Amino acid sequence: MVFGFVTCGPNEALVVSGCCHSKPRLVPGGRAFIWGCWQQVDSISLNTMTLQIESPRVYTAQGVPMSVTGIAQVRIQGSNQDMLLTACEQFLGKSHDEIRDVALATLEGHQRAIMGSMTVEEIYKDRKKFSENVFKVASSDLVNMGMSIVSYTIKDIWDDQDYLKNLGMARTAEVQRDAKIGEAEAKRDADIKKALANELQKEAELANQAKMEEARRNFELKKAMYDAEVETKNAESELAFELQAAKINQNITVEKVQINVIERKQQIAVAEQEIIRQERNLDAKIRRPAEAEKYRLEKIADANRKRVLLEAEAEAESLKLKGEAEAFAIVTKANAEAEAMAKKAEAWNQYQKAATVSMLLEVLPDVIREVATPISGTKKITMVSSGSGEIGAAKLADEVLAIATKVPDLVKTMTGIDIAKVTTKTQ
């Protein structure tokens, strides 16, 4: 006799009956208060039971004996009060093995029934359909007993007539045949695909080669265009450089010509200064001494003439006493001497011109030397040619000679003596 609270685990259910209850009170996995002798408490297991269902030598719809082993998971449903109450009505007070045997027998009967309604091929090939049929048919009966099938599956199928073996051999032969056919077809398809792949590969290679050739052609064309453009730019640059160089050279040439003109002007100025210097030198060394000598000789001749006249007059005066004859002789002598003196003066005058020419010819080399001296001391001489006449050293010699030929004109300007006429007359 129990009085107080009674508890049970989650895998059990308490069944309280007696006073205060028109029907048993079901408490799955909890506690309940028991009033001693007025109430009775029992428990029922809610554990899942694993059942191995053996169905040996069951004749199928074709009359072929088959053996099937199934595995089922079965339990009393504690979450549903109606099913739990039904299970209590069916199994309360029975042991776990007794409950297990009832469920096993029920499932075995339904498994055998389903096996008899199907062919061997259906059972063997479509196990899922067989399992669903057994689960569906057996579930309704077990629900009526307050139990539910958690799962059902076929563990094994066999026979003692080698039906499955022969079926397997035929199927194996078919599979082998299909395998060989499939292998041949696969090989054929592989060869076809390989040929197609090779063809596609060759086409791709040809297309790739064509693209490469096209790309190479485009590259060569662009390269040629770029090279032509670069060469054009280089040619333009070279022409611009040459043009600039030509302009610079032209400017340099113009500057050189200007320098040469300036140098030439300077040389002409130097030559003119040298001519002036030579003229002055000639005037100082030749003209003035010649004029002085002329003046001296004229004075001497005049003095002699006067002296002779005075002497003649004196002598004539002194000889007046000696007679007219002697006077006439003396006068005649005086006239002769005077005439001699005049000829002598004239000779002196002629001597003066010859002396002047002689002195000019003696100093002429010095004049030419003095003219050439500045040129010989010049470090650089630039000769400008108009395109006709001599050039180089011959041109320079002509320049020196041209300066020298101006000396007679200079002498004629300074003294009035034409050297060319004098030399012609002397010859």
Image (cartoon, helix red, strand yellow):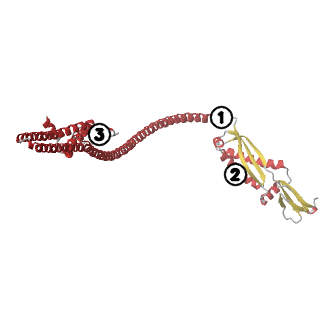
Q: Which mark is residue 45?
A: none
Q: Name the residue beneath numbered marker 2.
A: 136
Residue nearest the observer in this picture, 103 or 193: 193
344 sits to left or right of 77 = left
Which quarter of the figure is the C terminus placed in?
Answer: top left
Disc 1 from disc 3: Cα separation? 148 Å
- Of badges 3 and 2, nearer the viewer stands 3
332 sits to left or right of 405 = left
Residue nearest the observer in this picture, 43 or 103: 43
Identify the amino acid type marked 3.
Glu
Q: Which of marks 3 and 2 is nearer the N terminus?
A: 2
Identify the amino acid type marked 2.
Lys
Give residue 169's position: percent from left, percent from top: 62, 33
- Of badges 1 and 3, nearer the viewer stands 3
Give residue 18's position: percent from left, percent from top: 89, 62
Residue nearest the observer in this picture, 262 or 363: 363
Q: Is residue 266 visible?
A: yes
Q: Earlier in the sequence, mark 2 or mark 1?
A: 2
330 sits to left or right of 42 = left
Residue nearest the observer in this picture, 78 or 251: 251
Q: Crowding near pointer 1: few (<14 within 10 Å), some, many (20+)? A: some
Q: Residue 370 carries which label?
A: 3
What secondary structure is found at the residue carrying circle 2? Answer: helix
Disc 2 from disc 1: Cα separation? 30 Å
Q: Can residue 410 be seen in this view?
A: no
Q: Name the residue beneath numbered marker 1.
A: 165
Identify the amino acid type marked 1.
Lys
Kindly check if marks 1 and 3 are in contact, taking CB atoms under 8 A apart as contact: no
Give residue 383's position: percent from left, percent from top: 28, 41
Disc 3 from disc 2: Cα separation? 153 Å
Q: Which of marks 1 and 3 is nearer the N terminus?
A: 1
Furthest residue toward bottom: 20
